[in-house]
Amino acid sequence: MKLIKRTKLAAAIGTAALAGALCAPANAAIVLGGDNGWEVSYGGFINLFYTQSDFDFYAGGSEDSSHLNEGLLPAFHTLTAKSPEIGGLKGTAQITFAPDSSGAKNKRLNKGGAEIDMREVFFNVSGDFGTISAGRTLSLFQRQAILKDMTLFGMGALAGPDGGGTGLGRIGFGYVYPDFRTRFTYKTPDINGFNLELGIFDPQEGASASETDTPQFQAEANYTHGFEGGSFSAWFGLLWQEQEITASPAGGTGDIESFGWNIGADLKFGGFNVVGSYYDGEALGALLFALGGGDAWACSATNCDEADNDGGYIQGSYTFNGKTKVGISWGFSAQDDNAAGAPDVDGELWTVGVYHDVNSWLKVVAEYNEHKSDFLGNEAESFSVGAFILW
């Protein structure tokens, strides 16, 4: 048995794409090797936060809350197998599951429902031609936005004062959640810092009866350039899907086209880091892509119509001595009305956070978040403190 260095996100989520997207202090994963050249590693983390919040509800009333739950990330446990190189090909297989340690306040000791989320089951085959990947892992569209978000290792916004599970981070306050989806993708080799990844994804359908006779398509282009004392990276992503609504509560039928694009940049110089991200499109949903009728799209008695979506965030931080990051960020998400005449919904979130690496396996976090959300129907101030143990 030996230890190898991996990024914290690689140890937790595991894919090379995710690891390369987030600069984090090195962490060790447990690795077993065999005489035949195969290598199996196990890594992950567990976290928990204490949050004190003050909610005001648009329907009336307010609530102060003291609660214990995960941050934006639940616990991650990742098993990865890597093949020896044979005939110019290398293989990687990975399984990642994500259990929760917290439940809603009213569930007492019995959480109820699914307690383990199987987030990743995929394999890669790579060579001089690039990488072919098959299975379930984080989607391409809006992937960089969530991975660059400093609340990834924090809490971010809260859906409510008493619920279980994770915080929202900036989901609905700067980006649409990319989610973990089943797909086939092809990624080009790195060409002077540039690479392109293209994929077909299992299409998603809304609450109304519908048909999807074509896959969902996503793509992401990335460029990275290093210079003395820092680095610059930029990305551009696309999503497209079409579904035919065959029946709806209002009686209308028609085709719904979901389309989105996002762009962003990440600049590091010395201890300073600035990140900006923006997305635009239609029928994307306020929080989660294609959440369903009445949100991402809706049908009247005569036709169906997509809602318009856009949003983004700007983030600045400084890291002291390579261990303590202090950052501030602001972001928004907006959705215009659709065929059902639903009102416009907006979400806005301010975050101030401190993220400190005590050592290679212990991270402590403190965050202040203030959000307003038409979609959630509330506004809130919250203060969270928590910790991660990583292996």
Image: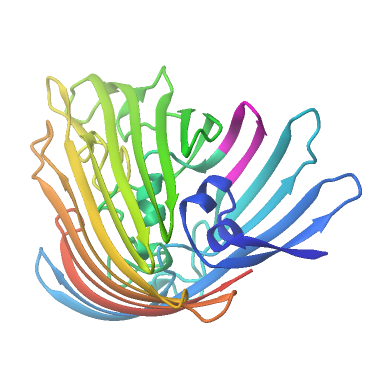
Q: Residue at x 40, y 45 (%)?
A: 143
Find residue 59 and report its horizontal and vertical position in percent: 10, 63
- The kind of secondary structure the magenta stretch mainly shows is strand
Seen from the viewer's position, the closer of residues 386 and 307 is 386
Q: Quadrant of residue 338?
A: top left
Find residue 100 and report its horizontal and vertical position in percent: 51, 65
Indicate left or right for 38 with 335 as reference: right
**Residue 121 shown in magenta:** yes
**Residue 314 shown in magenta:** no
Q: Quadrant of residue 123?
A: top right
Indicate left or right for 125 with 355 as reference: right
Find residue 72 and report its horizontal and vertical position in percent: 40, 63
Q: Residue at x 73, y 36 (%)?
A: 90
In the picture, which quadrant includes the C terminus?
Answer: bottom right
Colour mode of the rendering: rainbow
Magenta stretch bounds: 120-135
- Whether residue 158 appears in this view of the structure is no
Q: Residue at x 58, y 48 (%)?
A: 15
